[in-house]
Image (tube, rainbow, N blue to C red):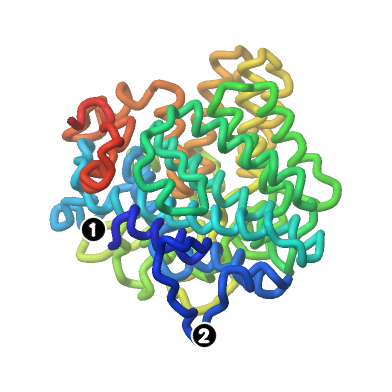
Amino acid sequence: MKKLSYILLALGLTATSCKKFVTIDNAPSSLAPSDVFASDGTATSAVVAMYSYYTTTSCLQYYNWTAELLGDNIQYRLYSSTPLMAEFQNGNVTSTNSNVLNYQWYNPYYVVAQANSMINGLSNSATLTSSVKNQLLGESYFMRAFHFFYLANFFGGVPLSLDPIALNNANLPRATKAEVYAQVISDLKAAEALLPGTYTGNFHARVNKHAVEALLARVYLYQKDYADAVTYASKVIGATDVTYTLSDLSTTFKNTSAETILQFATYYGLSSFGYRASSATAVPNYYLYNSFLDQFETGDNRKTAWTDSLVNGGVTYRRVSKYKLGSATAGDEYNVVLRLAEQYLIRAEANAQLNNTGAAQTDLNAIRNRAGLGNTTAATKDDLLTAIAQERRIELFGEFGHRWFDLVRTGQADAVLSKAKSTWVARDTLMPIPYQEILNNKALTQNPGYE
């Protein structure tokens, strides 16, 4: 895997021209950067390539794998022979862990660099159709914000690489986490102003205004800006130009689901995440802890709809079964990135924090009732927050590490995970800045406890 600084350099040299460097002719099958943003078709192809990146690398999968293993819902079957993954499952991740370098650091920065190039090229183009330009710019801002959001939640403050010229990003120090969040919000606000509420294409597979609003609602919740979290979740829940509804549990993760706000069109579903093997009798790499399964209430239909079991060698493995496909070749499942249920839970938590207990109960009950459960008995602010946290754990398991991020943002990670992980240390609430990157960039500093 190439070092981040070299990848950014390569991207920067293709996105700009600089007389200090030797000029090399474009390959016969490629376009000059100035030509890429000259027409609607080529500019669209360039932006859509940011989505297709997820079909050719493990970026999206490792966001999910590593974040889920950091929590206490999912375990890794092969951890004894794969020490890199064992560090995530058991605690005490090290700064030389190449999965941290390649998938939590390198891959998101790669897409950030692509987004920087897109934003620069699109902004400077005078030949694109206005509506197309706005759509593509909005998508690019969203992609940059999406990856900086995850970088901030994995590492805390990180370098804010915003310049399309890679050399200008190569030796940046870490911004503060607050500064990264401010950039995320700025990018999302820019995207919100540019994008329509309707979707481009037949599926919910490209970013629209409501995907931006959904991520903004999450960002505001994480930032404890509860009023804005309510506002933005409500924009999504009450959208009129697109109708989002809580689907039947059996169709929630179909690519035609009306619950989906954003999905990446890879035809992989969670089979690519290692939750389901291609063979019906093969043991998946990742499966559920029994202690997690014990958290389901009696009568919760999600337990039967979204988990199943496989017996192999006399051992019963409980699998994540939100997606049903075991093959990555074709089908009716995409990777769901944002969905409506999270927005109800965001609004419920934010309203509980604002002491709007009735509103919090209503949204919490929407999720519970869809699962076949009765209304919540929680009535006070504290009881509601506990009930909502539990509902988030049950509703969002296996989806990009919500449990891990919830424990960290609410200050519960050390107390909960020190009991669940054999080598847990408190520093693990942040991942280490990869050692190789600190060698490459002397301006980088390490997170506490990893020096």
Q: Nearer the viewer, residue 323 or 181?
A: 181
Q: Nearer the viewer, residue 59 or 73?
A: 59
Asked if residue 362 can be seen in this view, the reply is: yes
- Type of the residue with mark 2: Ser
The label on residue 29 is: 2
* Separation of residues labelled 1 and 2 (CA atoms): 53 Å
Reading the image, the residue beneath label 1 is: 315
**Dot 2, how many residues are within 10 Å of its Cα: few (below 14), some (14-19), or many (20+)?**
few
Q: Is 68 on the left-hand or right-hand side of 435?
A: right
Instruction: Name the residue furthest bottom.
Output: 28
Q: Nearer the viewer, residue 318 or 47?
A: 47
Q: Is 367 on the left-hand or right-hand side of 201?
A: left
Estimate the x, y position of residue 442 in percent, counting from the top left: 25, 38
- Please tell me whether mark 2 sits on a helix, a strand or a loop: loop
Residue at image location 68% in from the left, 57% down from the top: 124
Q: Quadrant of residue 412?
A: top left
**Residues at discs 1 and 2 in contact (Cβ within 8 Å):** no
**Dot 1, how many residues are within 10 Å of its Cα: few (below 14), some (14-19), or many (20+)?**
few
Residue at image location 48% in from the left, 66% down from the top: 14
How many labels were placed on the picture? 2
Note whether 368 is above or below 24 in the view shown: above
- Please tell me whether mark 1 sits on a helix, a strand or a loop: strand
Estimate the x, y position of residue 137 in percent, counting from the top left: 68, 54
Estimate the x, y position of residue 72 in percent, counting from the top left: 34, 38
Instruction: Name the residue furthest right.
Output: 240
- Type of the residue with mark 1: Val
Asked if residue 372 can be seen in this view, the reply is: no
Instruction: Name the residue furthest left.
Output: 81
